[in-house]
Amino acid sequence: MNLLEIQGLHHAYNGAEVVRGLDFALPRGAIGCLLGPSGCGKTTVLRCIAGFEPLRAGRILLNGALVSGPGAMLPPERRHIGMVFQDYALFPHLTVAENIAFGLRDPAREARAARVRELAALTGLAGALRHYPHELSGGQQQRVALARALGPRPALLLLDEPFSNLDVDLRERLSLEVRDIIKASGATAILVTHDQQEAFAMADEIGVMREGRIEQCDTAYNLYHRPANRFVADFVGQGVFLPAKVLNARTVEMELGTLQGEIPGACRIGCDACGKGCFTDILLRPDDVVHDDDAPIKAEVAHKAFRGAEILYTLKLASGRRVLALVPSHHNHALGERIGIRLDVDHVVVFQPER
């Protein structure tokens, strides 16, 4: 059974609609994510779930019970939802232990203290319970906010851009830690972010949003390798589109050779009937283009970005078009150098050409 169900959600500010007929469901125990660019409506959806915003249309159900909808608006404090805010919202005059205990309602002091110790152990804060927020690192402050939100054992945990104030290295490490903590607690959670790496690291299922709608809701693997449309393909991961001719329902021909595989809608791309001559755009990810000194096709190194273990090369083809290639960093080629490349494509992703 789904813990959360959102059905046909609409919301507007001053008459401007920012969420347009959004549908989303989250099974119990799962971590979901709403991923999208700034202004796409993802934080508004989170506020509607929390009960901070009324709906223009649609319904929100928690545990099968209507909490927002026509004639229904359950107050936030009765929704049994925990929230981790972007700025953590810790109380500076309270210790870590007091911050964690703030939302606990058990009247027995020992029961509250036991729950604080349990959460401190879960979040790695056992040695910091007497400290104040200003004495903690950003990562520790984030864990305090998480422990406080988990304290009352909420039915649903909401995280609004929780890592945006942290540096890149800490953000990546902490996103994995937070996932482990949420899973160990048994909570169900929704993350809102514009950062796909956070989404990939934390979420079981990700809804990619654009202009108030979910374009595709899927696993990170499918979003990357099987994007539903060009927007998802562009937003998730890196890649370029190259023109290609559809030879048949399993084969396309392009500048870098022919590719075979299941080509979605091959007979509907660029023509009205099945047959040769259909033109399409094919998506090539950096991991689809392999550096191979013995390959007959050569490309010029136009740009390189060193990433430690790997180098992301931008390669200029004979036609002048460019592709990306992710290459182990011991293959360190100079700008202007011509290197051999070949394709190794497991998922053929094609879309109708843009006009």
Image (spheres, rainbow, N blue to C red):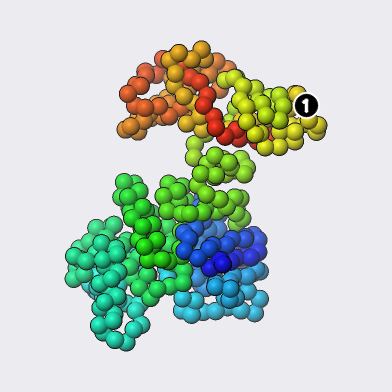
Q: Does 83 sit left or right of 281 as displayed?
A: left
Q: Nearer the viewer, residue 345 or 8?
A: 345
Dot 1 amino acid type? Gly
Q: State which quadrant residue 73 falls in.
A: bottom right
Mark 1 residue crowding within 10 angstroms, few (<14) / some (14–19) / many (20+): few
The residue depicted at 44 percent of the width and 18 percent of the height is 292
Measured from the top left, where is residue 46 in percent x and y? Answer: 51, 64
Q: Could you say where residue 326 lies in the image, as x and y percent from the top left? A: 43, 29
In this orientation, does residue 201 appear?
yes
Using the image, determine if residue 145 lies above or below residue 137.
below
Residue drawn at 58 percent across, 42 percent down: 227
Residue sitting at the far right = 273
Quadrant of the snapshot with the C terminus: top right
Give the residue drawn at x 34%, y 79%: 104
Which quadrant of the rendered structure holds the N terminus? bottom right
Q: Which element is circle 1 on?
A: loop
Residue drawn at the location 51% of the way across and 21% of the way down: 342
Q: Quadrant of residue 250?
A: top right
Residue 259: where, in percent of width, then height? 61, 25
Q: Nearer the viewer, residue 65 or 322?
A: 65
Q: Is residue 252 toward the left or the right of residue 297 in the image?
A: right
Q: Is residue 118 left or right of residue 82?
A: left
Q: Is residue 62 above or below residue 212?
A: below
Q: Residue furthest bottom?
A: 107
The residue beneath circle 1 is: 275
In the rendering, at what x and y percent does residue 100 appear? 30, 72
Q: Is residue 90 something one can see in this rendering?
A: no
Count of numbered circles in the view: 1
